[in-house]
Image: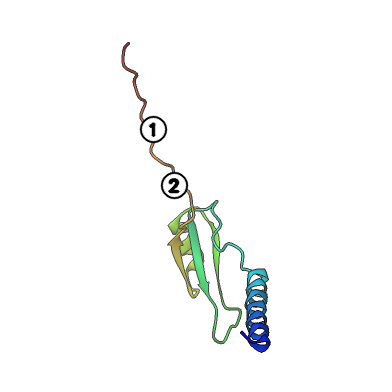
Amino acid sequence: MSLARIFASRTSLALIVASGALLAAAPTQGQTFDPRYPVCMHVYSGANGGGGEWYDCSFTSLPQCRATASGRAATCDLNPYFPVNPPPRRLRHGRPG
């Protein structure tokens, strides 16, 4: 194997590692859904208004969210990250012994 080929393979490996490190260190977007509330309003304000779109997860019911979304470019959805209470565990009775 020639010296030029070894140098080229090491350089390409270094570029791959460096680009992976840059991608891993890039800032990420925070969690969109607030898990404390069961209903979120998805607001669309793109095109002429600018600002993009966002979620407002501060509603305790669908009617409350729909009243706020009325007349706006928005929809109300159930929060997929709202914790649903699991069913209570059944008690196990031990065998008489």
Q: Quadrant of residue 26?
A: bottom right
- The way the protein has been coloured in the rendering is rainbow
Circles 2 and 1: CB atoms closer than 8 Å: no
Residue 97, image x, y percentages: 32, 11
Q: Using the image as rendered, state which of residue 18 and residue 58 is in the foreground.
A: 18
- Tell me the kind of residue under disc 1: Arg
Residue in the image at 58% along x and 83% along y? 49
Q: Using the image as rendered, state which of residue 19 and residue 34 is in the foreground.
A: 19
Vertical order, 3 against 56 (above or below): below
Per the image, label 1 sits on a secondary structure element best described as loop
- Residue extending furthest toward the front: 1
Residue in the image at 31% along x and 12% along y? 96
Residue 60, image x, y percentages: 50, 52
Among the two numbered marks 2 and 1 on one chain, the one whose residue lies closer to the N terminus = 2
- Tell me the kind of residue under disc 2: Val
Left or right: 5 as drawn, with respect to 80: right
Q: Using the image as rendered, state which of residue 2 and residue 50 is in the foreground.
A: 2
Q: Residues within 10 Å of mark 2 (few under 14, many from 20)?
A: few
Which numbered marker is on residue 76? Answer: none
Residue at numbered disc 2: 84
Per the image, label 2 sits on a secondary structure element best described as loop
Quarter the N terminus occupies? bottom right
Residue at numbered disc 1: 89
Residue 64, image x, y percentages: 48, 58
Q: CA distance from mark 2 to mark 1?
A: 15 Å
Q: Residues within 10 Å of mark 1 (few under 14, many from 20)?
A: few
Residue in the image at 48% along x and 48% along y? 83
Vertical order, 24 against 1 (above or below): above
Q: Mark 2, mark 1: which one is toward the viewer?
A: 1
Residue in the image at 64% along x and 87% along y? 2
Residue 16, image x, y percentages: 62, 78
Q: Using the image as rendered, state which of residue 79 and residue 63 is in the foreground.
A: 79
